[in-house]
Image (cartoon, helix red, strand yellow):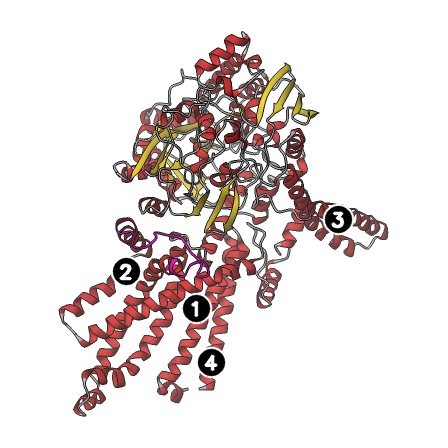
Amino acid sequence: MNKRNGLSRALKSTGIAICYAIIGLIFLSYGLSYGEAWAEAKPEAKQGFMEWGEKYCPEKPVSGGYLRVASPYYIGSMNPNHFPVMDWVTMSYMYEKLIILDGNYKPTIPWLAESWQFIDETTVLMKLRKGVLFHDGSSFSAKSLKYQMEWIMDEENYAWTRSWLEPLQAVELVDEYTVRWRFKRPWGSFLGTLASVPGFMISSQALEKDAAQKKSERITHELIPLRRKAKAEQDLVKAAQLHKEIEGLEEQQKKYQALAQDGKPLDTSPVGTGPYMLEAASTDNYLTLKRNPDWWFGKSIGKPEMPYFDGIRVSIIPDPSVRLANLKAGEIDSIVLNPIQYRQVKDDSKLTVSTFPVNFLVYMIFNHAKGPCSDIRVRKAISHAIDREALVMGTQQGLGRIASCMYPDDHWAHNPELKPVSYDPELSKKLLAEAGFANGLTLKGFVINTPEAQAFTKAQMAMLEKVGITWKPMFLSITGMIEPFKKLDFDLLGSMYPFIQEPDHIATLLYDPKSPFNNGRSSNSKAIELIKSGREITREESRRKTYFELEKTLCDNYEDVWLFWPTAVLASSKNLTGLNLEMYKSYGEGYHFSHPQWFKDGRP
Amino acid sequence: MKSYLLKRLLYSLLTLWLVSLFIFAIARILPGDPVQGVLMASHMGIADNNLIEGLRAKFGIDQPLPIQYLVWVKNFIIGDFGVSIASGEKVFEMFMKRLPVTLELFMGSAIWSMLIGFSCGIISAVRRNSFLDHLLTVGAVLGLSIPVFWEGIVLIYLLSVMTHILPPSGYVPFTESITGNLLAMAMPTFIMGTQGAGLIARYVRSSLLSVLGQDFIRTAYAKGLSERQVLIRHALKPAMIPVTTVAGLTFGYVTAGSFIVEYMFAIPGLGRMGVNAIFANDFPVIQATLFIVAINILAVNFLVDVLYGYLDPRVKVRS
C-alpha cells in the first residue's frame, strides 16, 4: 500500500471523536468496565465535537463549488476489501463506517450504527441508523449489513479483511434496523473491526452483482484448462467426468451471469452512503464526485445543506512537485504534502499550512526464518546502527516522531514506558563481532520503487555501512515483491504500515505466523499468545495492559526496526475554510466526518 | 528508386524483428510473476491449480517461450494486443483511448520543433558570428542538453506558479474545450519541442552555411536576387536534405521524452500508460507500448528515406 502521497483525504479520516472526559462520563453513568461501557452509545447527547458555533468556525458555511484535490494514482480498486487498497483519496468521500474512532483511536462514536449493547461476551445487539440511503437508492438496513459481513467471510470472495472477522459466528436479523452479532468466543477487537475497513458499508445490491460477476469471470478462467484436459483425455470414463465437471461449472456460470446482469464493477463504480458519489472518471486524468443530496447526517442534525461543496474533483497527478505547483498556482485547493516540501509552503501567505501526527509506521522487517537476521545479536546490531533522529531530520525535515514500537505515541494501546532504540554504532560493531561478523556483513533485501523510498533507503544504507553492514536492497514494484516475499529471498526490508487503528489488526497482520502479511515470518510465541489474548479480552484496562506487554515483548526480541511515526503536512488554499485543527487533533475521525469544509466565496 | 525503397523497407523489417525479440525478452526479464500479481490483487494470492492454469492461458504464458513469441507477433498483426494484467481491459482499446492524446502531443511538439528549430537555424546562418548567432547557439545547446524534467519544473514555476499563464498539469480533451485543450498542451508540447528544436537549429545552421558558400548561391546573388530570394528560392531546399534525417531522428527522442512529459504533466497518453505498466509489471501493455513506439520510429525513418530520395536526386541516381 502506498503511503503518504496518495492518501490525503484518508489521512483526514483517521482518529478523532470523544475525549477522555466523555469516556469518563460514560464510565460513571454505567459504572462498568470498558466492554460494558460500550453498551449504549448515542452521539447527540454526549459528543463534545458536535459543535458548530463560534468554537468550530466563526464564519457561516457557504454552499457551492467543486473542491479540487489531487491523488498520485487511481488504480480502479474502490472496494475497500479488495487488495491493494490504494484509492483511499476518492473512496473516503464515498463510504462511511458503522463506527468511527475518537482522538485516541478508540471505536466509541456511533455513525451508521446508532447504538450497541453487549448482551454477554459473545452477543451484541446493534441498532442501525434509519433513513440512510446508498448512492444507488437502496436502503441501508440490517439485511445489507448482514449480506456484507457474509460476503467478507465467504472465502470465495477473497476479501483481504476476511481474517479480521474470523471470530464472527453469525449476524442475525432482529428487525429491519437491528442485528444480533454472535461470536465464536469473546471478541475484544469487535468494535475496532467495525471502525475499520470491514465497517465501510457498501450497497448489498451492488455487492451481490459484483460478486456474481467476479465469480463468473473466475469460472471462465477455470474452464480453460478443464476443456483442454477433457479434449486431451484418452480414458473415456475420465473424459466423461471432466465433461460433467465442465457442465456443472457452465451451469454455475449462467446463474452468476444472470445475477450480475446490469451490474457495474464496484471497483470502478463504488456505491456507499457517503456525502459524495461518483460522477465521472477519466483514466489517468481525473475523477469527479457529486454531492449526495440524500446524505443522512446533515439532515439528522438539522443542517440539510451539508455537505457544502457541489462536488469533488480528484486530479491524478503522479509527480509530487507538480502536485505542489498545482496548489501554488491555485489549480487545486488542498493536498497532503511530503514533509520534504514543508519549507516550500510554510511561509506562503496564500496557503494555510498545518502539520499533524498520523497513525502510520515506518519500519524495517527482518527475515526471522533464515539468514543472519534470525540471530538476535544481528537484529540488535542493525537496530542500534540506525540514527533515527538523523533520519527524521534529514528525510522528513524533522517532521515525525521517533518510534519506540509499532503503535503511535497517541494511540491508546501504545506502551509509554518504552524508549526508542538508541543510536550506538560501537555497540552494533561489538554485537556483530559476537555474532561472527567482525569483518562485515552483506544483506540483501528490497524496497518499493518510489523516489521517496529510494532517498530514505539510501540514508539507511549509509548508516548501516558505518558499522560494517552492506545492505543491497533492490527497488521493486509491488508485483515484483510478491515472489521474493514468498521465497523469503531477503534479509532486511524497508516498509511502511498505514492507518494503525485497531491494535489487533496490525499485530495480527505483522506477527501472526498465519498472516499473509507476516513477511518476515516472525514467530514469537509469547507475542502470539498476547495477540490472541488482546483479540479476546473485552475489558479496556486488561486489553491496554496486554498491548503494553505485547509491545515490550516485541521490543525485547528486536522483532523489527521501528523507525518513526510520520507527521503529515496539509496545505490548503485560504479560500477553503471550516477546518478547526485543534478540534481535528482532539476528536479525530469524529470531528472529520461530521464537519465538512466549504469555500469562503462559495465558488460557483 | 524502387530498389532503394525496397532495400530500406527490408532493413526496416529486419530491425523491427530484432526489436520485437528484444521487447519480448525485456518483458519476460522483469522481476515477478504476473499471474501471482493478479492473484494477489484478486484472490489474496490464494488459488487452486485450475485458476492458475486458466490465468496463464489467458495471458498466453502457459506455452514455451518461442510459441509465446510467435503467438504474440501473430496476434499483434491482427490487432489483438492482449489483455492488461492490471486492469483486465483489452490493450488495443486502452491504446486507442490514449492514442489521440499522444498524437496531439507529438504534433504539437513537432510544430514547436520545426518553428523554433528552422527559424533559429536560419537566423543563425544568415547572421553568422553575430551576437544573435551566439545567443541562438547557446539556446540551441541548452535546448539539447537540458533534461526534460528540469525544463518542465522550471517552466511550471515560471508560467504557472508565478504568472498563472498556463495550467501546471492536466489534460482537457479538445472536444470538451478548445481553449482549455490548447492551454493545457502548450507547455508539454513546447518542452518536448525544444528538445528537437535545438538539434534542428544546429543542423539547419551548419547545412545552410555550407550551401550558402556554394558557387550557385554566388551566381544567384550575381543575378541581382535579394538575400531573401536567394535564401528561399535557392539555399533552403538543398540545405534541408541533411536536416530531414535529423528531424526523423528527433522523432525518436521526442517519443522517449513523451514517457517523462506525460508522467510529469499528468497527461493520460501512451507514455503514461507505458510508465504505469512498468510499475505494475503489466507485460502485455509494456510489450504493446514499446513495440508501437518502435514501429513509429521505424516508419518515420522510412518516410525520411523516401523523402530523402525526393529531395536529393543523387540518391535516386545512386540507387
In whole angstroms, how far apart are the C-alphas of marks 4 and 2? Answer: 34 Å
In this rendering, is residue A78 above or below A141?
A: below
Query: Where residue A551 sits: x, y (%)?
Result: 47, 20
Query: Is label 1 or label 3 in front?
Result: 3
Label 1 crowd (10 A; few <14 / some 14-19 / many >=20): many
Question: Tag 4, which secondary structure?
Answer: helix
Residue type at the position of mark 2: Ser
**Residue with the mark numbered 3:** A254
Magenta region: B163-180
Q: Look at the numbered disc 3 and give the secondary structure of its residue.
A: helix
In this view, the mark in front (3 or 2): 3
Q: Which residue is mark 4?
A: B7
Chain containing the residue with disc 1:
B
First in sequence: mark 4 or mark 2? 4
Spatial CA span between label 3 and label 4: 56 Å
Q: Position of residue A234 (x, y in %)?
A: 82, 55
Whether pointer 4 and pointer 2 mark residues with C-beta atoms closer than 8 Å, the reply is: no
Q: Which residue is mark 2?
A: B145
The mark nearer the N terminus, 4 or 1, is 4
Which amino acid is tagged 4?
Answer: Lys
Q: Amino acid at mark 3?
A: Lys
Please give the residue where the numbered disc 1 appears in the rendered image.
B297
Judged from this view, the residue extending furthest toward the right is A237
Quick one: label 2 or label 1, which is nearer the N terminus?
2
Q: Please provide percent x and percent y for residue B19.
A: 48, 65
Asked if residue A41 is positioned above or below residue A522 in the image, the reply reads above
Does mark 1 fall on the same chain as mark 2? yes
- The quadrant holding residue B303 is bottom left
Identity of the residue drawn at 39% across and 27% down: A383
Could you tell me the amino acid type at mark 1? Ile
